[in-house]
Amino acid sequence: MATNSGWRLLWLCLTLGLLPGLSHQASIAESDYYTAGVVEFRQSVLSTSPWSENLAGYLEIIQSANASETDIIVFPELTINSMGPQTFVPDPTEQIAPCLNDPSALYYAEFLVSLSCAARNVSKYLVINVSEKKLCTDTPEDPRPCAYDGLNIHNTNVVFDRQGVVISRYRKVHLYGENRNTTYEPELETFETDFGVTFGTFTCFDILFYTPAHQLILEQGITDFIYTTMWFSQLPFLTAVQTQQAWAYANNVNLLAAGASFPLVGSSGSGIYHGREGALSSVMVQGTGERSIHVAQVPKYTVRRPIRQRRQRRALGTSREAISSSNFTMKRDYLENYQSELLPIAENQSGNLTKDICYEKFCCHFDIEWRPLEGGSGRSASYRLGAYDGWRNEQNVDANYIRNCGLFACTGPTLEECGGLPSSEKLEEQGLRVAFTRLEIGVTYPESREFLLMPNTVLDDLLPLEPSRFEWSQEQQSVDSYQYDVRFGLRDSVEVSNLLTFAIYGNYYDDKCTFGVGSEEQQVACGYKNGSSRLVLFGAGLLMPLLLLLRG
Ligand SMILES: *[C@@H]1O[C@H](CO)[C@@H](O)[C@H](O)[C@H]1NC(C)=O
Ligand SMILES: *[C@@H]1O[C@H](CO)[C@@H](O)[C@H](O)[C@H]1NC(C)=O
Ligand SMILES: *[C@@H]1O[C@H](CO)[C@@H](O)[C@H](O)[C@H]1NC(C)=O
Ligand SMILES: *[C@@H]1O[C@H](CO)[C@@H](O)[C@H](O)[C@H]1NC(C)=O
Ligand SMILES: *[C@@H]1O[C@H](CO)[C@@H](O)[C@H](O)[C@H]1NC(C)=O
Ligand SMILES: *[C@@H]1O[C@H](CO)[C@@H](O)[C@H](O)[C@H]1NC(C)=O
Ligand SMILES: *[C@@H]1O[C@H](CO)[C@@H](O)[C@H](O)[C@H]1NC(C)=O
Ligand SMILES: *[C@@H]1O[C@H](CO)[C@@H](O)[C@H](O)[C@H]1NC(C)=O
C-alpha cells in the first residue's frame, strides 16, 4: 500500500504540468457540505453507434452550466456501453488515468478514455457504470470455469477522480438475471475524495440486500453512498425514489442515486437524499424519459448540525402530476401472498378504523381516519390494509425475506386491482378522492442478525412523502429485549391525499438468526438468551443505534 501511494505521488508530480486548473468551486475538506449531481439518463437505443451517442450525451451534461458547481457527478447503470464495446478497467491501486496513459485508446475503450479526459478537464469526480471485460487469469484463485474467450464480463462502477485517474472499480454482487459474471468473492469497495468524504458504491438490486451497502454502514461506518441504477419500479412498495428515500432514511446516510430513464419499460428515478431529512432533490419522470442532472449541496455527516433549513426542495416537485399506466410501465408485487382487507370507505363520508391485520403471528396495528375530498365524480377510492411475513416473491433472482405492514391503493375493490397505476381514463374519472387525516401503523418487530426497517411511502406522482410530514420511531422494548416497537404515522395535523402506499418495509434479508424464529437450540446458537441478559453483540439492531449515537 505504501508503494502505491508512493507511486501516486510520483505520478502526480510527473504530470503536474498537465494538470488542469483546479476549479475554484471545488468543495474542500473543511467545508460542511459538498455539491453532487445525479444524472437521470435516457439511453440511446436506435442510433447505429449507441455508445458514441451516449458518450456525447454524457459529455454534454458534464460540461453543462447546471453541472458547473458539482464536485461529483453520478451517471446511471449501463447507459453508456451496454450494447458494446466492453472495456478493460484499470486496477485502482495502479492509479491509471486512461486519458494520459492510453490517449489513443489502444487498450481501454474510447469512451473510457474520453470520460477520463472529461473528468480532468472539468476537475470533477465522475462515477459511471460500464460493462467491463476482465481476464480470467487476473483471478487465478477462482476455480470456476472461464468462458472460451478467457474473459469475465462484469457490470462495474468506475470512479474517476479530478485528474481522470480510476480510483475505484466496483463489480456488482447481486445480479438481476443479467448475463454477467459475478466476482469470486464479493468486493466491498469504497473510495476517498479530496473533500473529505469516503463513499461506498452499490447498484440497483443490491439495495434489497445486506451486502454490500448495509454492511459498509455497520462495519465501516460509511455515511455516503453512490448508487447507480436501472430500476424497474414495482407497486406498492418498490418504486424507485420510494425505495431510495426509504433506504437513506432508515440508515440515516447520504445517498446519491442516478437512474436510467426509460419509463415506458419501467425505469426512472434519481435523487440526492440526506438521511432523516429526505430528498434534497429527486425526480421520477414519465413518458419517453429524459437526460437531466439534479444538483444539491449535501451536508456532511462529520459536521452534522440539528436541521438545516437551507436545503433545496425537490427539483421538479412543484407541479405535481398523477402518473397513469400509459406513461409508466409498472410492475406489480405478488400481493396475493398478503393477508389483506379492504378499507371500508363509504362514498362522500368521513370514517375511521382501528384494526389489527395479522399474517400468522406477525401483526400490524392500523389506526386510520379519513375524509372525502371535493371534486370527484363521487366514486370512492379503494385502499387495502395488508400484512406479510415471508420471502419476497421473486423467480430466478435472489429473494429477500420481508415483514411488511401497509396501506396500499387499488383501482377497485378486489385484491387483483391493487398495486398498479390507474389507466389515464380511470385517473380522470376517479382519482383518489380521499384524504387521510390520521394514519398510523404500529408493529412489534423481532431483532435479527441483519435487518432494516424502513418507512415506505409513495404518492400518485411516484414521489414519496417528505419526512417532515411523518413520524417514525423504532424503540427497543427494554435494554434486554430482542423486540422493537415501531410506530410510523402522519404528524399531528398533517393530512395526506393522493396516497398510493403508506407502509413499513421490514427487510430481513436472509432471515438468519431472527429472534423467535427456529428451534430453541437455534435461538441459543444465534445468541438469543431466554432470560434477562443479552448475549448477542453482532446484531445489526444493536450496532445500528450505537453507530447512530456515535455519529450524533
Ligand atoms: C473542456 O470543458 C469545456 C467546458 O468546461 C469544454 O468547452 C471543452 O470542450 C472541454 N474540452 C475537452 C477536451 O473535453
Ligand atoms: C462467466 O460467464 C460465462 C458465460 O455465462 C461462463 O461461461 C463462465 O464460466 C463464467 N465465468 C466464471 C468465472 O464464472
Ligand atoms: C452496472 O450496470 C449493470 C447493468 O444494469 C448492473 O447490473 C450492475 O450492477 C452495475 N454495476 C455496479 C457495480 O453497480
Ligand atoms: C401521459 O399520457 C397521456 C395519455 O396517454 C398523454 O396525453 C400525456 O401527454 C402523457 N404525459 C407524458 C408526460 O408523457
Ligand atoms: C438545468 O437546470 C434548469 C433549471 O433548473 C432546468 O430547467 C434544465 O432542465 C436543466 N438541464 C439539464 C440538462 O438538466
Ligand atoms: C369513528 O367512526 C364512527 C362510525 O364508524 C363514529 O361514530 C366515530 O365518531 C368516529 N370517530 C372519530 C374519532 O371520528
Ligand atoms: C357523493 O357526492 C357526489 C357529488 O357531490 C354525488 O353525485 C353522489 O350522489 C354522492 N354519493 C352518495 C352515495 O351520496
Ligand atoms: C422462555 O422462557 C419462558 C418461561 O421463562 C418460556 O415460557 C418460553 O417458552 C421460553 N422461550 C424460549 C424461546 O425458550
Image: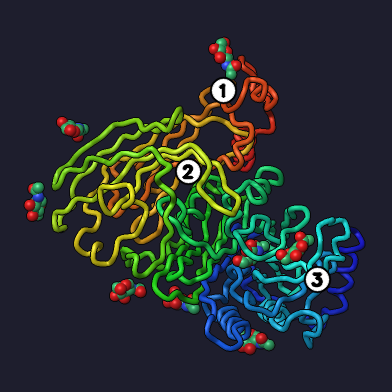
Which residue is labeled 1 in the image? Answer: 481
In front: 545, or 138? Answer: 138
The residue under the point 31% across, 43% down is 384
For disc 2, the marked residue is 505
Q: Which residue is drawn at 28% across and 41% down?
A: 342
Task: Please tell me in which quadrant of the rendered image residue 350 appears.
Answer: top left
Mark 3 CB within 8 Å of ligand 2 = yes
Disc 3 to disc 2, C-alpha distance: 43 Å
Of circles 1 and 2, which is in front? Answer: 2
* Residue 277 in the image, given as x and y percentages of width and height: 48, 51
Q: How crowded is mark 3: few (under 14 residues within 10 Å), some or many (20 or more)?
A: few
Quadrant location of the N terminus?
Answer: bottom right
Instruction: Check disc 3 and report its element: helix, strand or loop.
Output: loop
Residue contact between numbered discs 3 and 2, judged by CB atoms under 8 Å:
no
Residue 235 place in picture, x, y as percent: 41, 54
Q: Please state which amino acid type lies under the numbered disc 3.
A: Tyr
Residue 21 seen anywhere in this rendered image of the structure: no
Kind of residue sitting beneath label 1: Ser
